[in-house]
Image: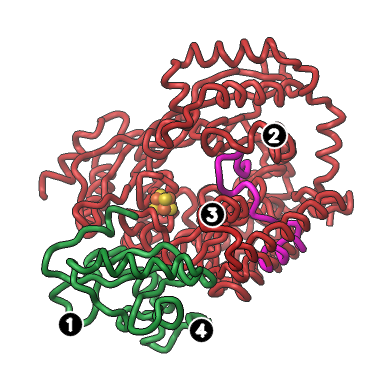
Chain colours: A green, B red
Amino acid sequence: MDVRNSRRQDGRSSVITANSLRGGQVVWLGAGDPLGDGWRERIEQATPVPNDAIAKALDRAAAAEAARVVIGIYGVELDPDSPTPMPVTERERIRAAGPSVRTDLGPQACLAGGDQGAHR
Amino acid sequence: MSGHGLPVGTYGYDATDRAFLADRVDEFRDQVQRRLDGALSEDEFKPLRLMNGLYLQLHAYMLRVAIPYGTLSAIQLRGLAAVARRHDRGYAHFTTRQNIQFNWIRLEDAADILAELAVVDMHAIQTSGNCIRNVTSDEFAGAAADELVDPRVYAEILRQWSTLHPEFSFLPRKFKFAISGSPQDRVAARFHDIGIVARRDDAGRIGFGVHAGGGLGRTPAIGIPMREWLPEEELLAYMEAILRVYNAHGRRDNAYKSRIKILVQALGAEAFTRAVEDEFAAMPRHRFRLEPKTVAAIAARFGTPALEAPADAAAVLAADRAADPAFDHWVSTNTHPHRDPGHICVVLSLKPTGGIPGDASAAQMDAVADLAERYSHAEIRVSHLQNLAFGHVRRDRLRSLWQELAALGLASANAGLIGDIVCCPGLDYCTLANARSIPIAQRISDRFADAELQRRIGPLRINISGCINACGHHHAAGIGILGVDKKGEEFFQLTLGGTAESDVAIGQILGPSLPEAEAVVAIERLVETYLSLRTGEERFLDTYRRLGNRPFKEAVYAAA
Ligand code: SF4
């Protein structure tokens, strides 16, 4: 895993992310079955996990990779000062929202009702 | 259509080529299915998808499609537009390696897309992996007045020699060729693993200058001259000798040290050259001899345009220019002399003010295909500077083309000027990025939008990369910008004095990296400093070379 995504401070929370194997789109682990409907396209639907429990949660989620639901599972630390789930790194904020230079695309566009293809 | 009845500028596939592509598509479809069924793990599947140009990027899979030597037919460009519309989000990105990238691809669709591309004789082979990659060439190939040979013919010869070459499928690392058909290097030849530049010897015979060991990335290096002049018949044998030496001695234990430039540096230029010459002397050269009839046979597979223009075509253009200063300005920046006096080569800028360098919408691609059919023998070129070009436009029809391009947003008069920014996808798309490169390009483009100001600044290249892999060729620009990660924050390092042209040089780091807003201000200060210190007709590079980086450094950091 990329070291830039593995920084974890005590007392903070992280969410678990991956890419869908079939579609390639960014997904976040929320309530539900990690082998089925647990992976969501919106970070708001992800379930935050305290950093001291994230390693175990990642181990459990790994089954979804073996089951060919997703690829590249890792944890993303959240900004403790944000009222909504907001990654601490710019990279993950862009993954969660979509390209900052094309706000008509990616999950950010759905908020604005713009993207034609996000839920294909 | 051409005098030969073949599509102009692109290599005409035959039944064997098409059967080969069809087999590759079937093979990949089967591989994808086996991945989805679980017969292949991701570790097993990843090299197979990469061999078909399919990467996993930040938001989705990304498909990189080869545009051999940067030439497309109108039919092919429409095929790409159709993929953008049907399988992506209605746009695509032209890269510095004359490829095109689709950013929102689904694995489930990938084989269908390759099948659709195969219908227009296109593919994604050799766009990834440790093989010989798509050979790049110059955007005025087969057209420029200063050209000695059509480089696409030799690029195709190299492609056929290298594709599926048993020894070259698993090289220590990726390997990139560029070939210029003109002695004027328009392909950044000396920043390639092997760069080939057509040249005449003292007797006036046409051959090739050969450079090896150039590259950008973490360790930028200028290719060393291997042969001042190599006869055409020895081209393949000599390339074989270089590749053999690289294959035998290149490092496979460390990805950072595996490119040929590191081998050249490790052995030293002299010892490397000697090793290649020894290999060349010892190998069965007759097996690789490039016969004139082979060259002629490959050349015959390319359509050539029937160049017909009215006798007054040049006079009409001169009158059009005199009548319209905006058109005149665009002609002076965005055209290049053609070998035929009635024709001209044209750059279609993919750098609108504040736009995303290299991006084109499906609608633009379709419209460019239509224009190519009407104005330039149905042929389009992609440049390594992320623009498009038409090779053969009649001079008397140039103004009408310009008007149509303007309506599509493709007539920015900025080729080679500060608005013509080269920029990689950066952190907005790329999983390897440290920082976003596109927003800084957009801010600089906005800041210098004024056409008069751009003209006053004159030739100045700004290239931006989102990480040290240097896909944006930042070391090869008068002003280079490199995104770096400083404790999770995006910072930008500036380099000055680089160029990939005949007076090749590697840009040098100016000082500590800056946050984005300060980096844009720094660019303004660099330009102001240059304008205040230049003498006569000096380009930015000339002033920098005369004065060194001190005044520029002071201007950027003194106020900070
Ligand atoms: S330079 Fe880096 S960030 Fe830019 S496209 Fe290449 S790998 Fe990605």
- Tell me the CA gap for discs 4 and 1: 28 Å
Measured as percent of width and height from the top left, residue B369 is found at 69, 65
The answer to whether dots 4 and 1 both sit on one chain is: yes
Name the foreground residue: B48 vs B442.
B48
Residue under label 2: B166
Residue at disc 4, CB closer than 8 Å to ligand 1: no
Mark 1 vs mark 3: in front: 3
Name the foreground residue: B443 vs B464.
B464
Measured as percent of width and height from the top left, residue B26 is found at 74, 60
Residue under label 3: B46
**Of the residues shown, which amino acid type is indicated by label 3?**
Lys
Residue under label 4: A116
**Of the residues shown, which amino acid type is indicated by label 1?**
Pro
Examine the image and state in which quarter residue B244 appears.
top right
Residue under label 1: A83
Chain identifier of the residue bearing label 3 in the image: B
Alpha-carbon neighbours of circle 4 within 10 Å: few (<14), some, or many (≥20)?
A: some
Q: Which residues are magenta?
A: B112-138
- Residue at (77% x, 55% y) in the render: B23
* SS label for mark 3: helix
* SS label for mark 4: loop
Mark 4 vs mark 3: in front: 3
* SS label for mark 2: loop
- Residue at (68% x, 68% y) in the render: B112
- Residue at (46% x, 72% y) in the render: A25
* SS label for mark 1: loop
